[in-house]
Image (tube, rainbow, N blue to C red):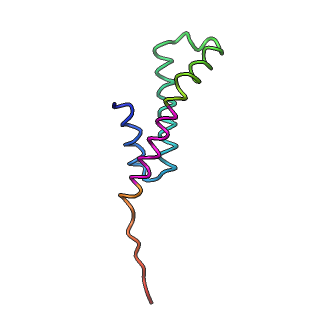
Amino acid sequence: ILMLAAPFVIGFLSGGIKKGLTLGFLLAFTMLIVETIIIQPGAFADPNVVMAIILMMVLPFAGISMGLGAAGGFLGSRLFKKARVRVYI
């Protein structure tokens, strides 16, 4: 549950849909690559295994995180909307 809540909170705090989308994807993508390197250090010796890891494990989760980051950014931009002040002269 925490792995799905973190991108939403990151997007919420970023304050915009584009920033939440970008941060949600990049953070999840890099964390999963680093996790794979730490857990299976020999897997990155073969390029076929690297592509399989990225396509089958990293990209689906990064896509879900990207969507949650965008949703959090949308909600954050609506809640923290700046007050528009109009000056009439």
Give the quarter of the figure containing the C terminus: bottom left
Residue 63 vs 77, above or below: the answer is above
Instruction: Examine the structure image and report whether residue 27 is included in the region drawn in magenta.
Output: no
Q: Position of residue 36 (x, y in %)?
A: 49, 18
Residue found at x 46% / y 21%: 35
Q: Position of residue 27 (x, y in %)?
A: 47, 35
Residue found at x 64% / y 11%: 46
Tell me which segment is drawn in magenta: 62-76
The image quadrant of residue 48 is top right
Residue found at x 39% / y 48%: 12
Residue found at x 42% / y 79%: 86
Give the quarter of the figure containing the N terminus: top left
Residue 20 vs 64, above or below: the answer is below
Q: Residue furthest top?
A: 42
Instruction: Examine the structure image and report whether residue 65 is included in the region drawn in magenta.
Output: yes
Q: Position of residue 13 (x, y in %)?
A: 38, 48
Residue 77 vs 62, above or below: the answer is below
